[in-house]
Image (cartoon, rainbow, N blue to C red):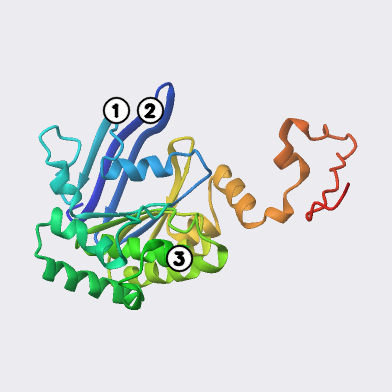
Amino acid sequence: MTDAVVDIRGLNKSFGSLHVLRGIDLTVSTGDVVCVIGPSGSGKSTLLRCVNLLEQPESGTVLVGGVDLTDRDCDIDAARRHIGMVFQQFNLFPHLTVLQNCTVAQVTVAKRSTSEATRIARENLVRVGLEDKVDEYPAKLSGGQQQRVAIARALSMDPNLMLFDEPTSALDPELVGEVLSVMRQLASEGMTMLVVTHEMAFAREVADRVIFMDAGAIVEEGRPAEVLGSPTEARTREFLHRVLEPTKLSTDEFLGDRAAPAGGPAMELPKIDPHGLTP
């Protein structure tokens, strides 16, 4: 596709004997929001890290903006300047203020003047609602605020593509909404985004396409209403059942071999005092 920002073909990645990615083919078009869902250990984060070559694949090609990042002659540092990434952990410099965290890469990598970097950083801090925190240090911010600073930092490099690796997984539930709100805003502005997430409501509302991964492979993909609303693959249905209806899981589904055999008596689970008051 001529408008493809990301074009991945035949991607394979292993860690020792563990085959983490198995022949992945994936295209993300300009302005699209693609959400990748799946169980832990399915290869989602590794896929994302291969997009900007934080992980080196064994085989396959990764093109971003038409540049083959897997080509030995590729200037990977130059290519990464057009790719913003937001991690699970915020990865802010603790000894720098919010403003300095958003200017340091602009000055050292993009070679912008301090005044220009400051102007751009302030504009992006306004976008994420943190213009009043420019002189604070990360330790003084909530988790949600720190993640919004991380987003502003990435945006300050003027990326053509934003990668989000479970950006809300380390946050308290009350703080998730403020980060997702910023991401919704970016999507509405036309930012191309590849998002690994467990936030199904966000994927349903914002994504143009949802990809379900398991065991290092893409099992199913399509529009959110299709993948999340009426999935065709049994493994997708099983995953969504566990994620969306956790209180309806039967004992067999989460105890596996320890569950009672078919036709046998139900296993009585021990009663647990959540406050730890039982002697």
Label 1, on which residue?
58
Mark 2 burial class by Cα count in 10 Å: few <14, some 14-19, many 20+: some
Q: Secondary structure at mark 3?
A: helix
Tell me the kind of residue under disc 2.
Ser
Query: Which callout, 1 or 3, points to the residue nearer the camera?
Result: 3
Q: Position of residue 129 (x, y in %)?
A: 36, 76
Mark 2 → mark 1, Cα distance in angstroms? 7 Å
Q: Residue furthest front?
A: 95
Tell me the kind of residue under disc 3.
Gly
In this rendering, the answer to whether 220 lies above or below 137 is: above
Label 2, on which residue?
14
Tell me the kind of residue under disc 1.
Glu
Label 3, on which residue?
144
- Cβ atoms under marks 2 and 3 closer than 8 Å: no
Looking at this view, is 205 or 116 the one in front? 116
Q: Is residue 37 at least partly visible in the picture?
A: yes
Q: Position of residue 68 (x, y in %)?
A: 16, 41
Q: Secondary structure at mark 2?
A: strand
